Amino acid sequence: MTLSGAIPVRKDRGRTTQNGFQNRVRFECPKEKNKVMPRVRSMSQIWKKEARYIIKTALVFCALSAAFSLVGMVLPEKVLLHNPTGGLSLHEIAGHMLWGLVAGTVFLSARYVIITGLFAVLIDSDHIIGLFHVEALERMSHSIAFGTIAVIVLMISFGRKDYRLGAAAFAGVLSHLSFDAFDGDSKFPLFVPFYNHQIIFPTIDWILFEIAAVAVAGTVTILATRRPRVITAQP
């Protein structure tokens, strides 16, 4: 017999007492048993993933800059290019890297800080064409056109919604021009292919280029991190 109001419990669901009440038996829910727990990544795995992303984007940017320099062979105002290896120095590499890192700090992300610093150095791969002693317009990638193309290609290749990657590409170009002006080498075809002449900028203009790089990175960071505003309907 069971007490009034008690619900008999089927024996196949667990052991029962003499009065018909079910003992507290722990059952495993089939859904919870088969549920796959999220995999926790270690710090080394996270850094390896970040390193692969940084290396891939840097290689694409470097190859793109070298390829864009070939366009200078069909433009007017071209000159005979010379071997560029003599102009490569630790001073230039460190300076461009530093200027790029400073602009990249506005991203508030180690990934994009490093990427911006690398882009500011690797843009000089447009000098590789000089190894072949051909006639071309020099320093083709030191231009707004290349910065725009780099933004488009990188965002298509690595994620159309990764706006900070696109901003890092353009900020890298601007910070590179900033250090060139600071170092007294401020002659580049900024408006190619619309104006195919080398433009000489005053040394003091390095501040303007660096401010522009920081502004690009900062604006995109604010837009990318801003949460959408939730609007509730009024009754």
Image: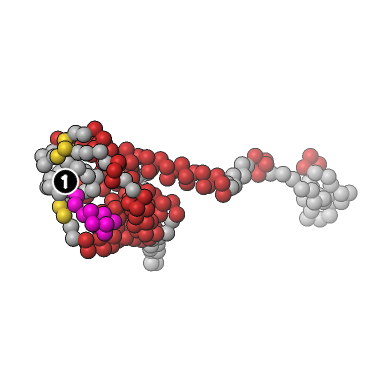
| Residue in front for this viewpoint, 2 or 37 | 37
Percent coordinates x, y for residue 184 in the rendering: 23, 57
Q: Is residue 188 magenta?
A: yes
Q: Name the quadrant containing residue 73.
A: top left
| Residue in front for this viewpoint, 173 or 218 | 173
Question: Looking at the image, can residue 134 be seen?
Answer: yes
196 to the left or right of 18: left
Percent coordinates x, y for residue 74 in the rendering: 14, 35
Q: Is residue 61 magenta?
A: no
Number of residues whose C-alpha sits closer than 10 Å to that of mark 1, classed few (under 14), some (14–19) or many (20 or more): many
- Which residue corresponds to the image point at 22% horizontal and 44% vertical from the top-left? 139
Q: Name the quadrant containing residue 104.
A: bottom left
Q: Name the quadrant containing residue 108.
A: bottom left
Is disc 1 placed on a helix, strand or loop?
Answer: loop
Q: Amino acid at mark 1?
A: Val
- Which residue corresponds to the image point at 19% horizontal and 50% vertical from the top-left? 188
- Which residue corresponds to the image point at 25% horizontal and 38% vertical from the top-left? 83
| Residue in front for this viewpoint, 184 or 59 | 184
- Reading the image, the residue beneath label 1 is 192
Percent coordinates x, y for residue 100 in the rendering: 35, 55
Question: Looking at the image, can residue 152 be seen?
Answer: no
Q: How is the image coloured?
A: secondary structure
| Residue in front for this viewpoint, 222 or 201 | 201
- Which residue corresponds to the image point at 22% horizontal and 63% vertical from the top-left? 204
Image quarter where the C terminus lies is: bottom left
Residue that sits furthest to the front in the current view: 86
Percent coordinates x, y for residue 6 in the rendering: 79, 53
* Total number of numbered discs in the rendering: 1
Residue that sits furthest to the right in the current view: 18
Q: Which residues are magenta?
A: 178-189
37 to the left or right of 203: right
206 to the left or right of 18: left
